[in-house]
Amino acid sequence: MRIGMALNYSGGFKETVAELADYEKAGLDIVFVAEAYSFDAVSQMGYIAARTERLQIASGILPIYSRTPTLLAMTAAGMDYVSDGRFTLGLGASGPQVIEGFHGVPYTAPLGRTREVIEICRQVWRRERVQYDGKHYTLPLPADRGTGLGKPLKLINHPVRSRIPIVVAAIGPKNVELTAELAEGWEPIFYMPEKAADVWGSSLAAGKARRDPELGELDVIAQASLAIGDDVAGLLDFGRPMAALYIGGMGAKGKNFYNDLARRYGYEKEAERIQDLYLDGKKDEAAALVPQELLEKMSLIGDEGFVRDRVAAMKESGVTTLNVAPLGRTHEERVRLIETVKEIAG
């Protein structure tokens, strides 16, 4: 089982990267760099590539709407080059608030666009002359939609790898099925191992039935906050505001994927109430209603025995990469947490 860690995109980035060498020595395998309506992730990942030697680097995630498919492919090939083959392209649809609000692009057909983006990226990396006639992307652009001067082109450079790993962030049934069919990795959010088979099992099975064997086994990447000790249970509450934000505020009524997931986990009443309170501006009250069981079972917060049991449950459910957020008070404590969870994961 690999150990990953997500970098915070809201500030202190250079300071965090300066500490990555210590995490690398402690056994950290991969670092994920987010891109919301923040600094772009690509410049930050290039900075990480220059400051590390072994660490794998992943976008977590690049939205499919804010770049053309070929630019995503070029970016991934460039990142793979500067990192000597250590890059993973994490993709996702984000949500309409960000895509339409910040980028001014219609949030349409996330499923179909994801498939076409992946197929076009792999054409680019194989250095084929890119020609694609899809429902959402057509390359070259037809004459009746442009100047008529477009022609099929192939990437000038020779990529380090002709197939760069792709991870897709997905939680909806059809998105998960598509991911299991086409991608090297799958990154769900709010992962509860006890509920995973019930919620996603049929989607994963349907996708894997059409999976190209050359893709290998699907890398399942689960996120979890990490704290180990006899007095750390109170740290679970640090997850309440974020869970409430996603379940309550990341979307409108009937258009919130994370609220839907909480309902599928069996928290229908709680999900409805959290959303009502959050959308009314009562964020603290919404956070207080996030189920304790949800916080406990999607985290690695407790004594060492508890954490060992939770890691075992993650493994048993199919998780192959743990993307942790170490909650130590100091840098040294956080490094020790990475060392410990690396030993536990084996």
Image (cartoon, helix red, strand yellow):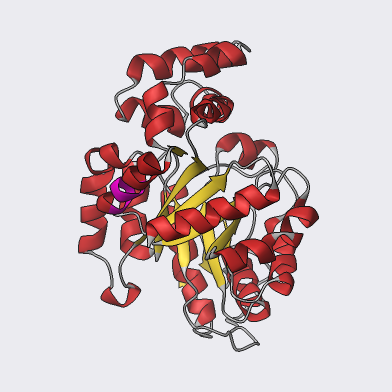
Relative vertical location of residue 91 with respect to residue 214 in this rendering, above or below: above
* Horizontal relation, residue 238 to residue 133: left or right: right
Q: Position of residue 204 (x, y in %)?
A: 26, 52
The chief SS type of the magenta part is: helix
Residue projecting furthest to the front: 230
* Horizontal relation, residue 317 to residue 321: left or right: left
Q: Residue at x 52, y 22 (%)?
A: 248
Q: Nearer the viewer, residue 112 or 275?
A: 275
Is residue 83 part of the magenta span, yes or no?
Answer: no
Q: Residue at x 34, y 21 (%)?
A: 267
Q: Residue at x 34, y 25 (%)?
A: 263
Relative vertical location of residue 214 with respect to residue 93 in this rendering, above or below: below
- Quadrant in which the C terminus appears: bottom left
Q: Determine which quarter of the picture holds residue 159.
A: bottom right
Q: Position of residue 208 (x, y in %)?
A: 24, 61
Q: Position of residue 334 (x, y in %)?
A: 61, 49
Region in magenta: 311-315
Count of numbered circles in the view: 0
Q: Nearer the viewer, residue 240 or 107?
A: 240
Q: Determine which quarter of the picture holds residue 98.
A: top right
Q: Nearer the viewer, residue 299 or 6?
A: 299
Using the rendered image of the protein, determine whether residue 113 is visible from the camera's viewpoint: no
* Horizontal relation, residue 86 to residue 263: left or right: right
- Quadrant in which the N terminus appears: bottom left
Using the rendered image of the protein, determine whether residue 87 is visible from the camera's viewpoint: yes
